Amino acid sequence: MIRFLSILFFSILTYQSIGQEFKCVVNINKPKLQNTDPKVFDNLKSTIENFMNSQKWTEDVFDNDERININISLTISGENGSNGFKSELSIQALRPVYGSNYETPILSHLDKYFSFSYEQFQPIQYTKNQYNDNLTSMLSFYAYFILGLDYDTFSPYGGELYFQTAQEIYNTLPKGLQDDDGWAQKIGFKNRFWMLESTLNPKCKNFRQGMYDYHRQGLDVMASNAEVGRKNLAKAMDYVDQTYQSYPQAMIIQMFANAKGLASLEIFKESTPQQKQQILATMNKIDAANANKYRDLSL
């Protein structure tokens, strides 16, 4: 567990990594488009996978079994000018749970505003503090956002550096692109701006502490001591509830519900009646639209 040890002792490993941070698999759903050769999307798939999997995103070393599995599904809905495409991006990131063969989702999100330009064989290259193109910016944003989520689960607020890097990516966008639906500061839009805003907002500090308790003190402990693990998971859910009360519109809360709702239900099925009622009450608050799926927990 090279990465965990580096976090535990607050050290940075500087020797060459034998593997990168992600295992990313891309699927592209494409209609028959009037002006685009379908082979463009085959090339795009391999280009995105190579970019996500080969880029060195951190200074830490990841063992192969520590790498974050990312599943990307890109649904092309139409053409947008020369070499431009309208699409939606479904992205899921999975964190390994220590002491088990289980992975837990830390992100499960649908981005409805994933428009970009791409020419066949066009490389995707990320340069720090520099804007190259929207596709590079969006993919790099998600890479660092996922790293922020992941590192928050290993130490309290451990993902701050990566969330700040995602913020820097936003700051390098041309002014016109910052007004695009996927990036814009528009009320009611569930987009990348509000993902980051809610994560870095001081009102969500308790939520981020909760993510450490949920994963490192909760799930990672379950294999050795299920009772202690569930106790810490219940504590984490209390932090989520506190955050919801102070900032009910926080996008990160809904994203948590999307990623963890059913998984949390399964974990707490063997819990005490008090813990069951706590998780049920919290999930019904933060995910009221899907309250039906939590009803079995009270049985």
Image: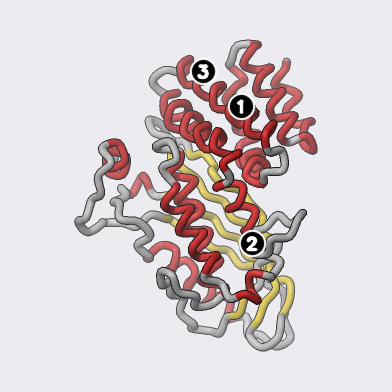
- Quarter holding the N terminus? top left
Residue in view at x 73 percent, y 71 percent = 77
Does the CB distance between marks 1 and 3 fall below 8 Å? Answer: no
Q: Which residue is mark 2?
A: 89
Give the residue displayed 70% in from the left and 86% down from the top.
Answer: 81
Q: Which quarter of the rendering shows the C terminus? A: top right
Crowd around label 2: few <14 · some 14–19 · many ≥20 (10 Å): some
Residue position marked by numbered label 1 in the rendering: 266
In the displayed structure image, the side of residue 277 where residue 70 appears, left or right: left
Disc 1 is placed on an element classified as helix
How many callouts does the rendering have? 3
> Residue 70: x percent and y percent?
50, 54
Task: Identify the image quadrant of residue 185.
Answer: bottom right
Q: Position of residue 293 (x, y in %)?
A: 74, 31
From the viewer's perspective, tell me whether residue 290 is left or right of residue 268: right
Question: Badge 3 is on which residue?
Answer: 231
Cα distance in 3D space between marks 2 and 3: 36 Å
The amino acid marked with disc number 1 is Glu
Placement of 264 over or under 188, stated as above or below? above
For the point 52% across and 49% down, which residue is it?
93
Q: Secondary structure at mark 3?
A: helix
Which residue is at the front of the view, 150 or 209? Answer: 209
SS state under label 2:
strand
